[in-house]
Image (tube, rainbow, N blue to C red):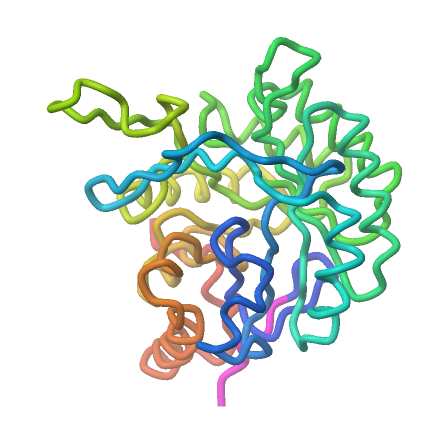
Amino acid sequence: MVDLSVSLNGLELKNPVMTASGTFGYGEEFADFIDLSRLGGFIVKGTTIAHREGNPYPRMAETPSGMLNAVGLQNKGVDYFISEIYPRIKNIDSNILVNVSGSNIEDYIACAEKVNELENIPGIELNISCPNVKEGGMAFGTSCASAAEVVKAVRGVYKKHLMVKLSPNVTDIAGIAQAVEAEGADSVSLINTLMGMAVDAETQKPLLSTITGGLSGACVKPVALRMVWQVFNAVNIPVVGLGGIMNATDAIEFMLAGASAIQIGTANFIDPAITVKVVDGIEDYMKRHGVSNVTDLVGALKA
């Protein structure tokens, strides 16, 4: 027998496999394909204080070994989530986290306060890749000062596990991680999508209505691995790794680089049962390599 359980600073997971926000809906969409209770946790789609229509179509485009998206945080708002979605998913035997997004600090605070009252939601994932409308549109997560400011504000009202999702579109992601750790983050997840664009040479137009969008999929994995390793060596809180994880081997690589848990995103669109396959694959790897506890893999890179 091997032990797959993981503790993320008090958030207890039955295994290290989670799902990435925006790729797994509210979880229930995948119930026909997998047993959701087999997951360590899943993170519901980005949730904001008010209803958002998102960006105009087209807002997704396939790229070599990946995809671009510019969905724009389309959702019906936190009150809709509380009244319509939460009652349907609250009893799933897994850790359900809400990805909280906002356009200003007040929005983050208001949304986090509402989610804080939900008994069966043990944590939030704070998306600091959102543009700060009060500061000219620069993302909260692209400077240490703004990242620290929003985390401090949310920490003041949110009393459960606070995971902070880091943007890779920075020059020093370790510095950002240290800044949010100092203001009370319980863990960090990385990476969010990389900025990219795609062009149709025949029409001479961009493939996305917004011109640029977020790049994800297998193509971003080397960048994500590097950043996870850098952050693991810079902070004392758990790191949750994501970015191009397509199979169990990818997941193991992230753990060796320092991730205590992982999230699967784009791969869900290719194979809706990939998450449980990765759980089984990690267990198989541990048996083959004589690893009794999955935590022994974390940061075990021989470098």
Residue drawn at (45%, 21%), measured in percent from left and top? 171
> Residue 92 lies in what quarter of the image?
bottom right
Residue drawn at (57%, 26%), measured in percent from left and top? 175
Q: Position of residue 136 (x, y in %)?
A: 62, 9
44 vs 109: above or below: below
Residue drawn at (35%, 76%), measured in percent from left and top? 285
Q: Does residue 3 show up magenta in the picture?
A: yes
209 vs 29: above or below: above
Q: Position of residue 282 (x, y in %)?
A: 40, 73
Q: Residue furthest bottom?
A: 1
Side (left or right) of 47 relative to 30: right
> Residue 121 lies in what quarter of the image?
bottom right
Numbered circles on residues, count: 0
* Magenta-drawn stretch, dominant element (helix, strand or loop): loop
Q: Nearer the viewer, residue 238 or 156?
A: 156
Q: Position of residue 16 (x, y in %)?
A: 53, 66
> Residue 246 lies in what quarter of the image?
bottom left
Q: Position of residue 66 (x, y in %)?
A: 28, 44
Q: Nearer the viewer, residue 81 or 132?
A: 81
Span colored in magenta: 1-6
Q: Residue furthest top?
A: 136
Q: Does residue 159 show up magenta in the picture?
A: no
Q: Nearer the viewer, residue 57 or 244?
A: 57
Residue drawn at (66%, 65%), measured in percent from left and top? 7
